[in-house]
Image (cartoon, rainbow, N blue to C red):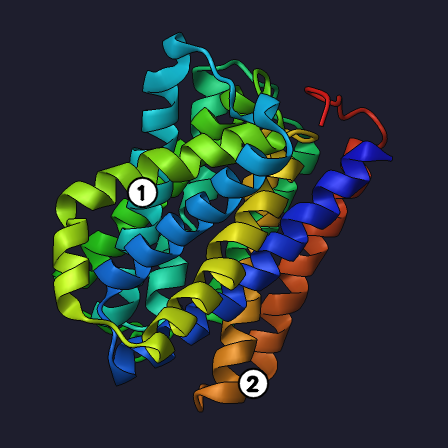
Amino acid sequence: MNHVRGYLAISAAAVLWGVAATVAKFLFNHRYEPLILVQMRVSISFLVLFLYFLARDRSMLRFRLKDIPLFFTAGILGVAGSNYFYYAAIKETNVSTAILLQYTAPVMVMLYVTTVQKERMTKGKLGSLLLAVAGIVLAVRAYDPAVLEGTAYGITLALLAAVSFSIFNISGKVLTTRYSVWTGLIYLFGSSALFWSFVNTPAEIAAAQYTWEDWKVFAMVAFISILFPYSLYYYGLHHIESSKAIIISTLEPVVAIVSEWLFLGGTMGPVQASGALLVIAAIVLLQRSTGGREPIVVPE
């Protein structure tokens, strides 16, 4: 039953990320730069979690000094990197192009865990991966060159986002074996926020004189794109393998395409709908091939 919770949690995270991608594109078109949104959303998320557990349960703030490099790897190269490169790619290209290239990450993770970590490649995993990739290609209409637009710079940013998302899945999975969901997230967000504070200092943020309306936007983005989805995703990583988690996350582009169609005038035809069904079929196949064998990694 716990592995089912993992599947559901990661699916819910993917839905939130898909909606957040469309929200981000809207905000980029109207005022905000990717860097400030990325920094504010992770910094606010860290402060919310840290202050909450500082007041309610300080045991969640304990960590081992030897794990600092791992937190920095997952938080900076994983969380900070994937957030910035993905949002920057959306601005430079479009949601479809950015998502298609970012979701080469499942292939990267699958190659890593099977060759380096010696995780077993099953027919269910391989079939689900192929279905998910095919579904994304159809959902974003990657077969039509006119749909995929952007400069070489934008394409590079999207591929870097894929590498960073892969790092988060692999290193984040290691952290799930050592810490609770909340402890892991506090220091993943904290290391990411610390990194961004050197790139865009508190003094520079203060000098920008953001209005109350701006701060409400930052808080909204923090909750729907970082705090809620990462909490769900990281919870899911406690119950299923990283290779399976990242395949399930391919639901994100489907949601992003639908939300872009609904709210930003995007396109959604029969071919894209077929792609969405393939991604959903991939998740169902993955879950059915697992059965009840997924272990619970650590207590929650």
Q: Position of residue 204 (x, y in %)?
A: 12, 57
- Indicate the position of residue 247 as horizontal and vertical percent values: 57, 44
- Percent across and percent down for residue 294 are 76, 26
* Quarter that holds the N terminus: top right
Quarter where residue 218 is shown = bottom left
Mark 2, residue position: 269
| Quadrant in which residue 147 is drawn | bottom left
Q: Please give left or right for residue 177 compared with residue 39 in the image.
A: right
Residue 193 bears which disc, if any?
1
Up/down of 186 relative to 93, above or below: above
Q: Which label was assigned to residue 157? A: none
133 on left or right of 153: right
Name the amino acid type tagged 1: Ala
- In the image, what residue occupies the spot 70% across and 30% down? 239
Residue 141 visible in the picture: no
CA distance for labels 2 and 1: 40 Å
| Residue 100 can be seen in this image | yes
